Amino acid sequence: MDEKSVRIALVVVDLFAAVSAIVGAIGLLVGFMNIPLTELTGTPFADFTVPALLLGIVVGGSALVAAMIALFGLQRFEALASAVAGCIMVGWMTVEIAMVGLDVWVQAAYFAVGLVMIGLAGLLQWAKARQTGVSGQPHAHRIA
């Protein structure tokens, strides 16, 4: 895969993660997701306000920033930004599953989305290094 194709895939996945996290956060805040408060039993939360804000701002915001960096920002940081956003997504899902259990397939799907973000970030970094001829490995010196 060439660098441009990987970057496009990375932006698409990052934007998907951002939009779905932000929409999910809004849904939790305004209550149209109809998730009962009993889901929060055993967690430190009395309602969905704090989890929704964390989901929208931290998870969705980091994915949105990663997508914007890949689209318009410093190419030097695009892989790192997406990898960090992917780690935040994986961390979010891990904590959610630990707190409320694995309730729906969507949790596993978003865990996988986070892993895809991390994988695409690595693939982009590899493609960029390959294109520029920088492997990160020390070069052996030949004696003529």
Image (cartoon, rainbow, N blue to C red):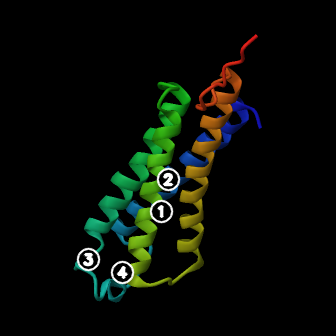
Give yes or no for contact between labels 1 and 3 (Cβ–Cβ under 8 Å): no
Name the element at disc 4. Answer: helix
Q: Residue at x 54, y 58 (%)?
A: 114
Q: Is residue 143 above or below residue 125?
A: above
Q: Residue at x 40, y 74 (%)?
A: 96
The amino acid marked with disc number 4 is Met
The amino acid marked with disc number 2 is Gly
Picture coordinates of residue 107 (x, y %)? 53, 73
- Chain-order first, disc 3 or disc 2: 3
Read off the residue under disc 2: 86
Mark 1: few/some/many CA within 10 Å (<14, 14-19, 20+): many
Picture coordinates of residue 55 (x, y %)? 37, 60
Give yes or no for contact between labels 2 and 4 (Cβ–Cβ under 8 Å): no
Query: CA separation, marks 1 and 3?
Result: 23 Å
Corner quadrant of residue 94: bottom left
Q: Which mark is residue 99?
A: 4
Name the element at disc 3. Answer: loop
Query: CA separation, marks 4 and 1?
Result: 14 Å
- Image quarter where the C terminus lies is top right
Corner quadrant of residue 65: top left
Is 105 left or right of 51, judged from the image as shown? Answer: right
- Chain-order first, disc 2 or disc 4: 2
- Image quarter where the N terminus lies is top right
Name the element at disc 1. Answer: helix
Read off the residue under disc 1: 90
Mark 4: few/some/many CA within 10 Å (<14, 14-19, 20+): some
- Chain-order first, disc 4 or disc 3: 3
Query: CA separation, marks 4 and 3?
Result: 14 Å
Give yes or no for contact between labels 2 and 1 (Cβ–Cβ under 8 Å): yes
